[in-house]
Image: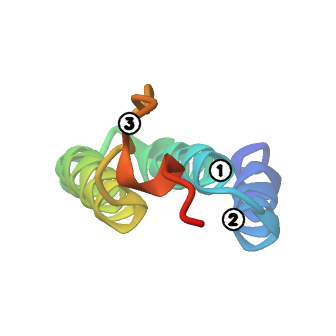
Amino acid sequence: MLPFFPAFLAGMNLVVLAAAAFTFLLSREFMSLASRALVMSHHRDADNRSAGYLYIVMASFGALSLLLAFGLLAGPPEATISPPYAPSNIRRP
């Protein structure tokens, strides 16, 4: 249990300090894995094993939900090639 607790605290701090969506998701996954390791530190108990499995399933569902939310916030992709006759490129006298 001892080596996983500082890793969990580091993951929590990384989540707070994340400046971009990718860094946020990566640090959140690191925190989730460290938290699962804390739950599974007493893996001989059957309840802890099932709790660890349920935790990783719910953490994966949360990560997918955040990924979908960030994708929706980003919006549709812009056109990469703008034709020369596009209305935004027409100069008016």
Residue 15: numbered disc: 2
Pointer 3 or 2: first along the chain: 2
Q: Residue at x 68, y 48 (%)?
A: 23
| Left or right: residue 24 compared with residue 36 | right
- Secondary structure beneath label 1: helix
| Left or right: residue 65 compared with residue 66 | left
* Disc 1 to disc 3, C-alpha distance: 45 Å
Task: Please provide percent x and percent y for residue 81.
Answer: 43, 26
Q: Residue at x 37, y 53 (%)?
A: 87
| Left or right: residue 2 compared with residue 23 | right
Task: Please say if the residues under marks 1 and 3 sit with CB atoms less than 8 Å apart.
Answer: no
Q: Residue furthest front?
A: 93
* Disc 3 to disc 2, C-alpha distance: 46 Å
Three-letter amino acid code of the residue under disc 1: Ser
Question: Residue under circle 3?
Answer: 85
Instruction: Count all numbered tags in the image, as a single digit.
Output: 3
Given this view, does label 3 or label 2 mark the residue nearer the observer?
Answer: 3
* Disc 2 to disc 1, C-alpha distance: 5 Å
> Which is more toward the observer, 75 or 4?
75
Residue 51 showing in the rendered view: no
Task: Please provide percent x and percent y for residue 84.
Answer: 46, 30
